[in-house]
């Protein structure tokens, strides 16, 4: 399918990027809650360990990632174009419509690490 292109309406593309951002922000916000729960659990465990003579205290946490500025950059960029329709190649379709980028995949992994749906 290399070389495949589609034309999309600019407003639809921006709407989809905003939807992708909203989902990302929702996952990030939940990840922050889950992270804090896990951090407190580990801290309490470490306090107990140290109180009982343990000498090795360390936390093993996966930090949530907020990529919302990347979505804002895309929204801003496409907002500046004077065209009503935008041509996307397959890889751009995957990035902008399907939200399939290295950074979005990495953020999704990190942000769902402690969730029961991971």
Image (cartoon, rainbow, N blue to C red):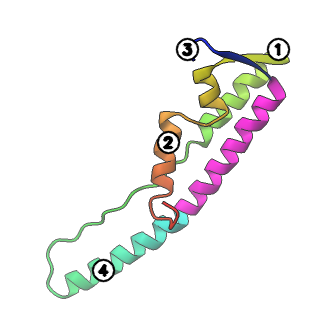
| Label ID, residue 105 | 2
Q: Which residue is mark 3?
A: 2
The residue beneath circle 1 is 83
Tag in front: 1 or 3: 3
Taking the spot 60% from the left edge, 35% from the top edge, the residue there is 70
Residue 45 disc label: 4
Secondary structure beneath label 3? loop
Give the distance between the C-alpha atoms of the residues marked 4 and 1, in whole angstroms.
57 Å
Q: Earlier in the sequence, mark 1 or mark 3?
A: 3
Whole-angstrom CA distance, mark 3 to mark 4, is 53 Å
- Nearer to us in this view, 50 or 5: 5
Tell me which numbered mark, 3 or 4, is placed earlier along the sequence: 3
Cβ–Cβ under 8 Å for marks 2 and 1: no
Closer mark to the observer between disc 2 and disc 1: 2
Name, please, the residue furthest toward the bottom: 52
Identify the image quadrant of residue 48.
bottom left
Query: Dividing the picture into quarters, in which one does residue 67 lie?
Result: top right
- Tell me which corner region of the image, top left, top right, bottom left or bottom right, holds residue 71: top right
Residues shaded magenta: 9-31
Q: Nearer the viewer, mark 4 or mark 1?
A: 1
């Amino acid at each position: 399918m290399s070389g495949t292109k589609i034309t999309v309406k600019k407003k639809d593309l921006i709407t989809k990027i905003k939807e992708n951002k909203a989902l990302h922000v929702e996952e990030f916000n939940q990840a922050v809650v889950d992270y804090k729960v896990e951090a407190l659990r580990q801290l309490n465990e470490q306090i107990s360990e140290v109180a009982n003579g343990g000498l090795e205290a360390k936390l093993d946490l996966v930090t949530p990632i907020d990529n919302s500025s990347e979505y804002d950059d895309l929204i801003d960029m496409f907002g500046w174009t004077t065209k009503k329709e935008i041509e996307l190649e397959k890889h751009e379709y995957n990035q902008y419509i399907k939200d399939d980028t290295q950074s979005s995949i990495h953020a999704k992994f990190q942000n769902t690490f402690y969730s029961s749906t991971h």
